[in-house]
Image (cartoon, rainbow, N blue to C red):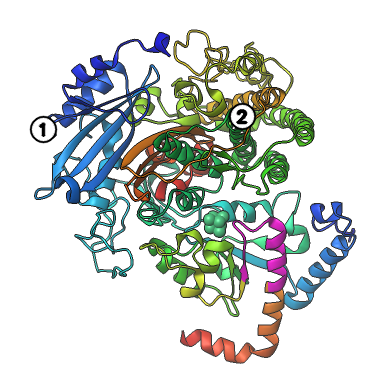
Amino acid sequence: MTDVVTSPAVDLQQLSGGELLPSRVPGETRVVVPLVTLPRACQVIVDGVGARLATMVAQDERAETGSFTLAYTFAIPDRRWMTIECQVPADSPAFPSVTPLVPAAHWYEREARDMFGLEPEGHPDLRRLVMHDDWPAGVFPLRKDFDPSIPVPRVEADPYRFHTLHGDGIVEIPVGPFHAGVIEPGHFRFAAVGEVVLALEPRLFYTHRGIEKLIEGKSLDHGLQIAERICGVCSLSHAVTYCQAAEQILGIEAPPRAAVIRSIGLELERLYNHVGDAGNMCAGVGFMVGVAHGARLKDELQRLNEQFTGNRFLRGLSAIGGVRRDLDVEFAAQMSLELARIAREFGELTAMILGSETTMERMRRTGILPGDLARALGVVGVGARASGIDLDTRRDHPYAAYRDGETARRRDGKTARRPDGQNLPPSPAVGRGAGGEGYSAVGRGAGGEGHSAGGGEGFPVPTREEGDVAARLLVRIDEVAVSFALIQALIAEMPAGPLIAGWTPPTTDAAAFSATESPRGENLHWLRVNAQGTIERYRVRSASFPNWPAVAAAAPGNMVPDFPLINKSFELCYACLDR
Amino acid sequence: MSTLHPLIPMLQSRQDEDASTLGQKFSDQVQRVLQRSMQIRHLDAGSCNGCDWEIQSLLCPAYDMQRLGLDIVASPRHADCLLVTGSVTRHLEIAAIRTWEAMPAPGIVIAVGACACGGGVLQGSYCTAGGVKNVLPVDISIPGCPPRPQALLHGLMLALDRIEQKLHHSNHEFRIGRSEA
Ligand code: SF4
């Protein structure tokens, strides 16, 4: 750990000009700043050390301290976290908006306004975000004095004002909330001239279920049942993130065997998502053979999930303190064989997709997300890596079996094989075979050269520079190879020992947060329990939260019919976002 | 017509040799009751997307419900039944009711998953209706979190029975009731 920390914690503190508070998780520098200097403190952290805004947590602490608190947490490139807090007085609930200086804060602050009634002064966009038009003004569901058992009436209100463009030949195309296929609900408003999109504005949060409020007052175990159901296809990632945050609070750690089983599960989750997504992206261009094969392989992976955990979405695997299911030698061997076969068949599928020039031509230069824009929005996951941002929570904030010391895994990660049998690092592989000059197989990072930060220097993080749909497909394909190799390596060296650590409900007020790399990118859960051992505040920042604005930013300049393809290439989730 | 593949590959592996006959029978029943395929509209009323992905997997080659004469359609106006997932969030309630109203009679409503059947883990939230039955008249409930594709197929079989019942026994009454609603 010490060798990767380039500067001691005090530097960050000095930089921010804040007063040091006790940190909540290892590697966190936590400071409190006066309200007026909040935006400036956030800006120096972002500009000074290249930090990424990872979450913002608002809290109603009026009963204890007489004020609300805001906590902006940043991911620092050298594997640390930085939290900048401030107090917002109860009698004038307003704060200077960070958004003009740090654009990634835009949705967080709008959400705090909807849910807590905290006014971000100077925020360029003060429309509702989470709560829709017919939610009465002055009712803030995450305030402690809001009683969820009293039904909130619908009110007449001005309809949401979409940004409109005026001019000759500009047409507005409204789509949603319900779409033609089996998709989640969300509204998209296009401004187009002919076929070309000029602007796209998404209106989301239709599936807002009030999960953060619902979970308050529940026990930690009960909370897990809910956290695991924030999202279907990232169930395990959410469950593990929640469990890790709870374990941090309880001061326990999952035993080594449980850590390995969690990682195997998390990689299985990535596999069935990425494999299915590679197929689904073909639907965006009408390449139905690819769709069918992707869906078939996805279903086979989900059956494997079911054999392993009893649930096709890996639900019920993770528990606070460890895991509920073991992976016995016999089944592990069977799984290993099955995965090797699926890896081979996925190789055939990718060769088919990459070899279809008409498919690849539609994907290349479509839906480009420029790297600097992705950085400004704090984008995570595949969307970030395909735009040249080298980030992966597994390496940057390692957890479960991704921690240092897993030497065999690291070694095997280095020699990860592509599903088509080529070694991962060499360059002229699949992409070029597809006739895509400029798409040499793996961007940088596959061999992990020069990564000072953690997770084992060898942890392969495929990145690409193009930022288009094709790049997002190729990053997924490369990550699939890494996951297959990781699982095989983890199965090969399963440590013996218990599956779960014991714990008793907490008796003091404590908070912690944790992050995992879901198939869609970093999921971050912030959890606080009170002295009664029940949940006081829970904040979920899923990968889709920072990434949705990026989808809207990548659409202009493309044809309207290419939007489904662009959307699928990001493959974001509405349920995770809306909560 | 060529013989159908086994309805459910996993059932077959459990030596349920009736699976393919079951598929054939179901497919014949669809023909008899509707004289065409059964058209399904999916409606996500605030799910976690687990249920929706299972509905999506009915279209994959392993289950391939289209071979049985079942298909997902793009508009409620073309639909015989509505597969509703999620506990019906506040922000989707009105759109869900409008979708149902746009369906032709008899308009079967199927609640898919624990959330849709009774609120699931979201019981007590300020932002959900606590289940589809509190918003729309539910005909069939398919429990599970999420229900497996096999359970969904079973639910669709029940839905077909329900359509048959409604068409034969309460056709007139139902249509009047619907237009007054
Ligand atoms: S029943 Fe389960 S899988 Fe279905 S929407 Fe609810 S939580 Fe998700």
| Residue interval drawn in magenta | B141-158
Q: Quadrant of the N terminus of chain A?
A: top left
Residue type, numbered disc 1: Val
Viewer-side residue, A248 vs A490: A248
Does the magenta-highlighted stretch encompass residue B144?
Answer: yes
Of circles 2 and 1, the one toward us is: 2
Local crowd at mark 1 within 10 Å, few (<14), some, or many (≥20)?
few
Residue type, numbered disc 2: Val
Q: According to the image, label 2 marks what residue? A: A260
Gap in angstroms between the C-alphas marked 2 and 1? 46 Å
Answer with the quadrant where ligand 1 appears in the image. bottom right
Q: Position of residue A188 (x, y in %)?
A: 41, 50
Please name the residue shown 29% across and 13% down the image.
A8
Q: Quadrant of residue A17?
A: top left
Q: Position of residue A523 (x, y in %)?
A: 45, 36
The answer to whether residue A311 is left or right of residue A127 is right
Q: Position of residue A297 (x, y in %)?
A: 72, 39
Q: Quadrant of residue A270?
A: top right
Q: According to the image, label 1 marks what residue? A: A36
Residue A118 visible in the picture: no
Chain that bears disc 1: A
Q: Position of residue A269 (x, y in %)?
A: 60, 38
Please name the residue shown 62% across and 23% down the image.
A482
Residue A468 visible in the picture: yes
